[in-house]
Amino acid sequence: MAWQEYIKKKQKCKIDPYKIMFFFFLLYLSPSIYNGVKDYIEYTKKLKELLERKTKLEKEVKELREIAYHMNDPYIIEKIAREKLFMGRPGEEPILIIEKNTEDKKLKIDFLNLFKK
């Protein structure tokens, strides 16, 4: 009877070799799968950025075509000269307003406060 129990224990502990082969096959492929998923995520981000850039460029092209279409209109020519080239009529002086960042002032004040007692 002891030998029959020994055979039953051996049969219960038997591991299917196909499961082991499948497990090692997955381990073998895991770096490829990881790199594929990583590349997919990276390229979808790049595609999204390129599509945003494409829409911006299409909008800019549309504006430039509209400007080119109206180049014979003196009002449009004067508007472009004033806004983009900072030009004015004779006797006028264009004023350029430059806003300073408040962060720069704050950094200077913080730096000076370091030396105060």
Image (cartoon, helix red, strand yellow):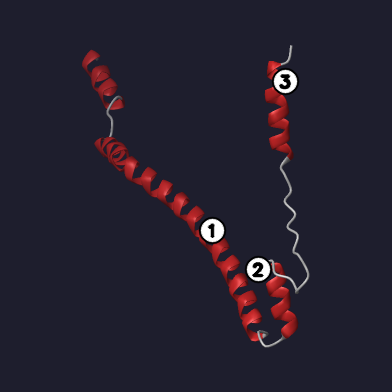
Q: Is residue 84 left or right of residue 20?
A: right
- Front one among 18 and 2: 18
Label 1 SS? helix
Label 2 SS? loop
**Figure quadrant of the C terminus:** top right
Residue farthest along the front direction in this orientation: 91
**Figure quadrant of the N terminus:** top left
Residue farthest along the top direction in this orientation: 117
Relative height, residue 102 to residue 9 (above, below): below
Measured from the top left, where is residue 111 in percent x and y? 67, 24
Q: Residues within 10 Å of mark 3 (few under 14, many from 20)?
A: few
N-terminal-most mark, 2 or 1: 1
The amino acid beneath tag 1 is: Lys
Measured from the top left, where is residue 51 in percent x and y? 54, 63
Residue marked by disc 2: 85
Measured from the top left, where is residue 106 in percent x and y? 73, 32
- Front one among 32 and 100: 100
Mark number, residue 113: 3
Q: Which residue is located at x 65 percent, y 84 percent?
A: 71
Residue marked by disc 1: 48
Count all numbered tags in the image, as a single digit: 3
The amino acid beneath tag 2 is: Leu
Disc 2 from disc 1: Cα separation: 34 Å
Relative height, residue 39 to residue 92 (above, below): above
Residue farthest along the bottom direction in this orientation: 72
The amino acid beneath tag 3 is: Asn
- Front one among 66 and 74: 74
Discs 2/1, front: 2
- Front one among 66 and 77: 77
